[in-house]
Amino acid sequence: MQAWEQFLQQQERDLGADTVRRWLRTLTVKSFDARNIYLEARDSFQIMWFEEHIRSKLGKALVNNNRCPIRVHLSLSSEILLPKTKRRRRSTAALAEGESFELSFEELDPACTFARLVVSEQNLLAHKIFSEIVEGADTSNVFNPILVYGPSGTGKSHFLMAAAHALRERGVDVGYVRAQTFTDHVVQAIRAGEMSAFRRCYRRRDVLIIDDIDVFSGKASTQEELFHTFNTLHLAGKQIILAGRCEPGELKDIEPRLVSRFEWGIVLPLETFTRDGLLKVLRAKAETLRFPLTQRLEEFLCKTFTRGPRSMCVALEALVLRTHMHQNKVSGGALQGSHISVAMASQLLADFIAEEQRSEVRPGHVVQAVADTYGITVEDICGKGQSRELSVPRQIAMYLCRQLLKMPYTQIGKHFGRDHSTVMASVRQVTGKIKEPGSDFASGIQALTKKLIP
């Protein structure tokens, strides 16, 4: 395929011929057409390397004769692997013949199974209940719906996807969907005048699983459809499984009638993993990757990546990939965890560590740091005062929330009790002052940044 060969030649100029020969030219072209190319990798490390270093380069660099982008599909052992953000499959909804309206759903993560779920004291009850469901126990009258809740990193999505995998293996018609996708489907159906098709798709399921129900907050039309879908399935004895960040009574801007239905069955809290639980997750992941870790490396990863199992495991995957790129440096073979020092791991994961530090900063930390610097209180910054002594620190706090935390303008506005246009204006003003010749703003912003992210 000429376009692929041209892309490889460009990468040779950017990355070097040796790198392209080792990581890209060893990909086997299985088939291609004008808009797609299907490649087969020799192992999972090659796929991981491609996703980290090449996927972002495709875009306009790999195009056909009409300048249209060519999509790259990677496979390993006949399993098609796409970027998580692009995993979709066509709905199996039983639409009437001739209808063109279709709904696309997320694919399940193949790694999210019960076999790979680490069981600890923090999720033991949830594991017991889910095991009964997927093993075919008739619990629909007692545990319907099942709602799991907890902060990010407690395994909510893993539980839901694992249940979907296990039930589908038994031939059960399972619909797994994120709340945002459900919302998008409602909007699509309304615009297309296809609400009947939407309802057939969702209300015929044996099991309906919805993740991230917090997203339904304030969405009246979506909540209306969810209410009737819930009633239809529940009356038919069909299982409903939900997940969110908080228990039903703490959900914001959700209709009381929906909240009461969420509480009909069983509500299962998932708590943050203890250190022992995190170590179990880390060791299980390392075993899956066939990358044994020393005790010092385990301690380093647990101590450094504190946002939860997800960030820690992503860092481990990156560490495995990057050590394999040095495969000729140690006895002509691949480096293993037992050969890596903490100092070397820190160097290889420098960008991940920086991102972890940024992620640990919260809007409250930013406001407190600005308040301390200017000798005022948090209440002053978030209050209604318009004097220069208060408005300037407030603008700086908004700017830092935008620059350091990458928060949307609307979210920043909610935190400060302002609308998004005020936040945008504040960010522009601070940006302009930083660029002024001889301004002290730049050094002041830099000092605050170092205070928040050492």
Image (cartoon, rainbow, N blue to C red):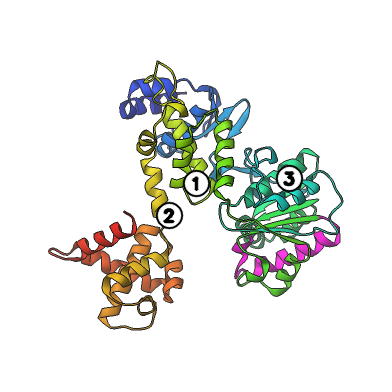
Label the magenta part by its dominant secondary structure. Answer: helix
The residue at 77%/46% (across/down) is: 131
In the image, 375 versus 23, the foreground residue is 375
Q: Residue furthest top?
A: 332
User: x, y (%) of residue 435?
Assistant: 20, 62
In the image, 48 versus 443, the foreground residue is 443
Q: CA distance from mark 1 to mark 2?
A: 10 Å
Kindly identify the amino acid type of the residue bearing the numbered disc 1: Ser
User: x, y (%) of residue 414?
Assistant: 46, 72
- Residue under circle 3? 92
- Residue under circle 1? 311
Which range of residues does the magenta coloring cover? Answer: 213-238
Q: CA distance from mark 1 to mark 3?
A: 33 Å
Q: Residues within 10 Å of mark 2 (few under 14, many from 20)?
A: some
- Residue under circle 2? 359
Residue 24 shows in this picture: no
Q: Say whether marks 1 and 2 touch (CB < 8 Å).
A: yes
Quadrant where the C terminus sits is bottom left
Residue 371: image quadrant is: bottom left
Give the mark, 1 or 3, whose residue is nearer the N terminus: 3
In the rendered structure, does residue 217 fall within the stretch colored magenta? Answer: yes
Residue 167 shows in this picture: yes
- Mark 1 against mark 3, which lies toward the viewer? 1
Considering the numbered disc 1 on the image, is that residue within a helix, a strand or a loop?
A: helix
Kindly identify the amino acid type of the residue bearing the numbered disc 3: Thr
**339 lies above or below 305:** above
Q: CA distance from mark 3 to mark 2?
A: 38 Å
